[in-house]
Image (cartoon, helix red, strand yellow):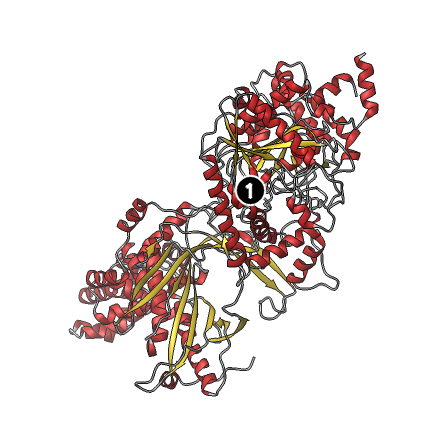
């Protein structure tokens, strides 16, 4: 594949206005699947979490999961949407082997939620309102694994394996209206929008929202339209592409930036944009052409005759509305105040998409500053090094446990960083890593005193300086003791003891 | 076959059930008698696609053991029943009459099967049908046609010709059918038997291989109205696995038969289904039946349902539209036939090759029709308009039922036609459903029961009653009453006039009787 020519981002923005649109799929963490009583769990042995319904066996019939309906209503309300008094499922017909019935049960012309908006905070603190067209319920497809061939994609594969464990997992698809006016902030807005959706579903408790596991998936639509001189009517909207496979917040931002630069160069060269899906490649930071997508794709939608309309009672809707958590923007204001962060500290956390992680770490018992320090510091550094999402490396509970070990004096910072790596490498909880690696700080004064006495004896000139009141000379002895203890000592305690022993000698 | 066996297979299920309950007859005896009958006549009739005598006898034996142990059993426990092959069974292959499912044994039982087994009925085999229930003659079965026991050269109706022929030829006292546009009632009409399409949602569809989900309904097939009612009471009721299943508490249909009385009942004759295009000798029997009902105190009035004119056109858009989607799952990936194109190919190639070989002509015709009707740009003109007609049909029925208790018509325009007669003329075949389709479009219940033999050809004629949704019991009432009036008049049942299919067997029985 020839490498696409990219226009400089600022220049692209001079020539074109980016126009955006997002489709975010949220996997709901209900107990059972959307239309069957199979456990809502995938992974594990393929094709084990399935019923005749999930396999689309002849004669089987779907039944709507009431819990999924309630979750969807809550999400719709949190997105500021109206909830349809009656909404309907439809069949979206197309042949594909990950689709057991060769149709997907989705909602088409009568979604459960419509007409909302979400306030999104940009990195510079500005608020941007993203219009929401609709949120509708549907079922996930199975998972195909293409074997043979170089790309792992269906083209060129020798054969493909299908796992229907994921078939029928409940999804809500959130579709934005066309988003104008993002301008140079388009990449950041994309990231902030997906991050806000994630915050909302986590606060509602309706999804695990792990992007790297596909719990939250974003398809990013983007087109460019040429700028016109002031006073002239705006140009027609450009042809859009839909970038799929964007599995992290960082990728969302990068993919939008890339597509703006790629499309701008093609248009500037007099070329045309093909309406198609594009695959995002995390490793190369590029997109490649997928299948052509036209507005005339004919899915032969018709009302699903096996299901009745979904008619939630007004009482249920009001009950769910009353139970909504505070909106993310308000929550952010509250947390910033509760945590006592400076503007800069809070924005760092926010922009790194770590608000949820810090909040959960604080909820698990860590101090806000310690939680921030770990997530923005060491964990983010490791995430960068490993080209992974910080949230995917370690759980808030483990971070809180790590902080507790430091606070109790069992670990110093250096040891804690080692323990963190152990946790990330799957060696267990922080305490298990401490035990397995024998990393605890030596708090036995006897062992420390023996090492100190030895070090003082080996450096009589230093001892003399300390006794003369030149306390800073103690550093050399402390260093020697820490070395002897292989770093597993609390430096502050060593310092105290060194001064004590020197004075007593 | 002994005289005893001969009696066992000819008695209605209600009578056999009494003998089983009293211990006079064992289920093994009854089951074996029917299996022997299948062995004797099904070579000619071809009502069954699959039987498993050992399996059926084991089920019968288990009922006999439970009864011997003093267990209190359902009144129908031990009675054999034939199952239309559209219904999935976890111990017998289920093909829906199609090559694409040849040999497929489902890993689960339909809800109606669970209910039958729980009541102790003994499944005796799977019956033949038009492929995926698409047809009115059983000629579209991938496994060859079923023959009408009254005249083996003629069709047994469809799609449930197998179930109707099995009951009419004494191979089973009861059968399950499914009715999307008349597939229970029209076969009952041409075979001199009884068939009921319950209210949509009255019987669970879970485990019935879907033809058209908004029209399909499982129902009973039998030789007497009471037998259908007894079976209806077993299979009816709410099923949480079928979202379209009604949550109503249902009255006993059998009670409705036993209390049957038509005095004061207002019966509306559907004028659109009484005249042009209907066989004259068939209409004679129809009018005689109305006269009997009037003499017994019913009030007979004419009722017009003007939108019925468009019902067939609407049906032949809605049904194929839903079928085209329902049949998409037959793609070789998870179950059923797989055909690999020469030299291999993509998954799409394999799907296409499988569907090319696995589906018969009528299935393909309807898939193409339905796909077209749902396509962008055509949806409003076809599927959309058809749904509007459906609403009009429903309104016509609602208006009609505001003035009468039940509606009545002949079940079909003609008696059984000859096998092959409508080959290459799908429209003629489709028109056979003109009287039965409206009930499916409206979701209302219907019954067909025999009213005699047509003057010109001596073949059975059925009458159809329709009632408002949820009023199935009303049909059993009027059906039971008419059946009694007719049998009093004739001095015998109609089915007893059917030609005997195994004369040797008959002779043996007669000798035994002497």
Which residue does the image show at 71% across and 48% down from the upper left? B99
- Asked whether the viewer can see residue B211, the reply is yes
Which residue does the image show at 79% across and 13% down from the upper left? B513
- Residue A352, position in %: x, y? 33, 69
Total labels drawn? 1
Left or right side of A344 for B186: right
Indicate the quadrant where residue B171 lies: top right
Q: Quadrant of the N terminus of chain A?
A: bottom right
Q: Please, is residue B497 above or below residue A331 in the view?
A: above
Which residue is label 1 attached to?
A: B438
- Asked whether the viewer can see residue A43, the reply is no
- Residue A179, position in %: x, y? 35, 71
A18 or A44: nearer the viewer:
A18
Left or right side of A120 for B454: right
Left or right side of A267 for B115: right
B8 or B60: nearer the viewer:
B8
B86 or B316: nearer the viewer:
B316
Describe the element under mark 1 as helix, strand or loop: helix
């Amino acid at each position: 594949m020839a490498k696409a020519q990219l226009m400089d981002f600022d220049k692209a923005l001079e020539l074109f206005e980016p126009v955006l649109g997002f489709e975010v799929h949220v996997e709901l963490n209900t107990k059972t699947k959307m239309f069957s009583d199979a456990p809502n769990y995938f992974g594990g042995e393929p094709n084990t979490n399935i019923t005749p319904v999930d396999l689309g066996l002849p004669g089987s019939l779907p039944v709507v999961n009431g819990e999924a309906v309630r979750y969807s209503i809550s999400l719709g309300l949190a997105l500021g949407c109206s909830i349809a008094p009656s909404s309907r499922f439809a069949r979206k017909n197309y042949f594909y082997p990950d689709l057991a019935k060769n149709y997907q049960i989705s909602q088409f012309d009568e979604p459960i939620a419509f007409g909302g908006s979400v306030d999104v905070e940009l990195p510079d603190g500005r608020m941007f309102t993203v219009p929401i067209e609709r949120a509708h319920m549907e079922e996930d497809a199975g998972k195909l694994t293409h074997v043979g061939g170089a790309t792992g994609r269906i083209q060129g594969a020798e054969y493909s394996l299908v796992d229907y464990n994921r078939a029928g997992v409940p999804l809500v698809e959130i579709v934005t209206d066309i988003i104008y006016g993002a301008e140079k902030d388009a990449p950041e807005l994309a990231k902030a929008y997906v991050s806000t959706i994630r915050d909302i579903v986590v606060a509602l408790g309706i999804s695990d929202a792990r992007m790297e596991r596909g719990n939250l998936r974003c398809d990013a639509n983007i087109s460019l339209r040429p700028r016109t001189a002031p006073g002239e009517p705006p140009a027609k909207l450009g042809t859009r592409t839909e970038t799929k496979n964007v599995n992290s917040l960082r990728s969302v931002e990068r993919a939008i930036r890339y597509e703006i630069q790629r499309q701008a160069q093609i248009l500037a060269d007099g070329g045309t944009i093909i309406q198609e899906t594009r695959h995002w490649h995390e490793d190369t930071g590029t997109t490649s052409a997928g299948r052509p997508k036209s507005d005339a794709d004919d899915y032969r939608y018709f009302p699903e005759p096996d299901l009745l309309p979904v008619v939630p009672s007004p009482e249920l809707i009001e009950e769910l509305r009353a139970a909504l958590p505070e909106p993310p923007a308000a929550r952010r204001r509250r947390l910033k105040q509760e945590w006592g962060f400076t503007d800069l500290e809070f924005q760092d956390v926010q922009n790194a998409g770590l608000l949820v992680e810090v909040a959960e770490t604080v909820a698990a018992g860590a101090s806000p500053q310690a939680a921030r320090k770990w997530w923005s510091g060491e964990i983010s550094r490791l995430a960068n090094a490993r080209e992974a999402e910080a949230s995917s490396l370690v759980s808030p509970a483990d971070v809180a446990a790590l902080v507790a070990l430091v606070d109790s004096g069992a670990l110093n910072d250096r040891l804690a960083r080692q323990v963190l790596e152990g946790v990330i490498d799957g060696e267990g909880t922080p305490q298990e890593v401490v035990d397995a690696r024998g990393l605890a700080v030596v708090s036995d004064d006897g062992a420390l005193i023996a090492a100190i006495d030895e070090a003082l004896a080996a450096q009589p000139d230093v001892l003399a300086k300390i006794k003369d009141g030149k306390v800073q000379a103690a550093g050399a002895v402390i260093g020697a003791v820490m070395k002897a203890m292989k770093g597993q000592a609390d430096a502050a305690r060593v310092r105290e003891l060194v001064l004590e022993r020197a004075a007593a000698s | 076959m002994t005289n005893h066996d001969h009696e066992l297979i000819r008695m209605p299920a209600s009578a056999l059930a009494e003998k089983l309950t009293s211990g006079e007859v064992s289920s093994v005896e009854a089951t074996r008698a029917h299996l022997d009958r299948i062995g004797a006549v099904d070579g000619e009739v071809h009502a069954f696609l699959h039987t498993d005598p050992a399996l059926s006898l084991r089920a019968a034996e288990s009922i006999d053991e439970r009864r011997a142990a003093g267990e209190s059993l359902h009144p129908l426990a031990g009675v054999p029943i034939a199952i239309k092959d559209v219904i999935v069974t976890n111990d017998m292959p289920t093909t829906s009459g199609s090559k694409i499912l040849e040999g497929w044994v489902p890993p689960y039982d339909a809800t109606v099967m669970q209910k039958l087994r729980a009541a102790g009925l003994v499944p005796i085999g799977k019956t033949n049908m038009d492929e995926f229930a698409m047809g009115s003659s059983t000629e579209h079965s991938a496994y060859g046609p079923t023959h009408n026991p009254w005249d083996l050269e003629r069709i047994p109706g469809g799609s449930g010709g197998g179930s109707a022929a099995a009951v009419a030829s004494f191979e089973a006292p009861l059968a399950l059918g499914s009715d999307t546009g008349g597939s229970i009632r029209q076969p009952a009409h041409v075979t001199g038997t009884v068939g009921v399409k319950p209210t949509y949602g009255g019987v669970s569809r879970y485990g019935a291989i879907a033809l058209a989900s908004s029209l399909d309904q499982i129902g009973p097939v039998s030789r007497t109205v009471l037998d259908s009612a007894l079976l209806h009471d077993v299979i009816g009721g709410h099923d949480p696995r079928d979202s379209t299943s009604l949550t109503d508490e249902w009255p006993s249909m059998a009670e409705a038969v036993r209390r049957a009385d038509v005095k004061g009942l207002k019966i509306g004759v559907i004028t659109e289904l009484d005249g042009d295009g209907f066989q004259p000798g068939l209409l004679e029997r129809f009018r005689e039946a109305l006269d009997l009902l009037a003499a017994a105190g019913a009030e007979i009035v004419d009722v017009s349902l003007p939108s019925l004119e468009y019902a067939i056109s609407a049906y032949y858009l809605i049904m194929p539209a839903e079928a085209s989607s329902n049949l998409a799952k037959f793609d070789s990936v998870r179950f059923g036939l797989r055909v690999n194109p020469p030299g291999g190919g993509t998954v799409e190639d394999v799907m296409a090759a499988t569907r090319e070989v696995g589906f018969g002509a009528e299935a393909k015709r309807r898939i193409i029709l339905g796909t077209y009707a749902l396509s962008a740009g055509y949806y409003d003109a076809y599927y959309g308009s058809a749904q509007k007609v459906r609403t009009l049909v429903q309104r016509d029925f609602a208006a009609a039922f505001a003035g009468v208790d039940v509606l009545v018509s002949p079940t079909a325009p003609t008696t059984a036609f000859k096998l092959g007669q409508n080959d290459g003329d799908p429209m003629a075949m489709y028109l056979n459903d003109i009287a039965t389709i409206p009930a499916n479009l409206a979701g209302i219940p219907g019954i067909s029961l025999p009213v005699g033999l047509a003057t010109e050809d001596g073949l059975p004629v059925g009458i159809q009653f329709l009632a408002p949704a949820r009023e199935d019991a009303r049909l059993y009432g009027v059906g039971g009453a008419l059946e009694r009036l007719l049998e009093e008049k004739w001095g015998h049942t109609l089915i007893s006039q059917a030609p005997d299919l195994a004369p040797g067997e008959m002779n043996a029985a007669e000798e035994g009787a002497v």
